[in-house]
Image: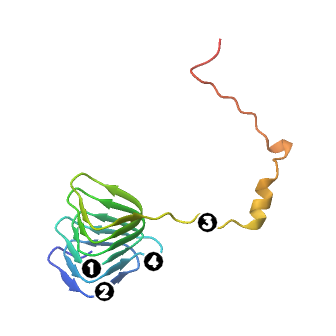
Amino acid sequence: MLAASTCLEGTLRFEEGVKIDGRVKGDVIFGIEDGLCIVSAGAVVEGNLRGPKALIMGEVQGNVEVDTTLVLAPSAVVVGSVKCGRFVVYDGASVTGSIETIRQLPPRMDPQLEIRTSQPPAESDVVPFRRRLFGARR
């Protein structure tokens, strides 16, 4: 966590997530596999923000690249391009720049698994299924 009275300059790298309450002059790279970056209300990042997930309530003056979900709270201000998997924007948030949503590629299937799943199920694997719609029958 970077406190509200903190001002750091340079590229910052975090193995996991980070909460920024102060001011950063430089790029913020976070979460190698998984991590959340929270830019608190009143916080300012003057640089690019890159990682898996982010919640922005403050200001980012740079590009934002998030692999999965990016949430912009009503107080969020982004001046730069946004690239993310999913984009949630609340009324009042501001983006000055381009917005691009990216789709993640589906995981590669094991060829052996595809062969097994393409065969019809054995008789012992079939389970009867009954469904009632709109209540019980009389």
Q: Which mark is residue 11?
A: 2
Residue 64 placement: quadrant:
bottom left
- For the C terminus, the quadrant is top right
Amino acid type at image mark 2: Thr
Q: Residues within 10 Å of mark 2 (few under 14, many from 20)?
A: few
Gap in Å between the C-alphas at discs 2 and 3?
A: 31 Å
Q: Dots 4 and 3: beta carbons under 8 Å?
A: no
Amino acid type at image mark 4: Ile
- Tag 1 secondary structure: loop
Gap in Å between the C-alphas at discs 1 and 4?
A: 19 Å
In the picture, measured across the screen, residue 11 lies left or right of residue 23, that is: right
Q: Closer to the camera: disc 4 or disc 3?
A: 3
Q: Which residue is mark 1?
A: 47
**Residue lying farthest to the top in this orientation:** 138
Q: Say above or below: 11 vs 63.
A: below
Residue placed at 22% from the left, 56% from the top?
74
Amino acid type at image mark 1: Gly
Q: Closer to the camera: disc 2 or disc 4?
A: 2
Q: Which residue is mark 4?
A: 32
Gap in Å between the C-alphas at discs 2 and 4?
A: 15 Å
Q: Dots 2 and 1: beta carbons under 8 Å?
A: yes
Q: Say above or below: 67 vs 23.
A: above
Gap in Å between the C-alphas at discs 4 and 3?
A: 18 Å
**Residue lying farthest to the bottom in this orientation:** 10
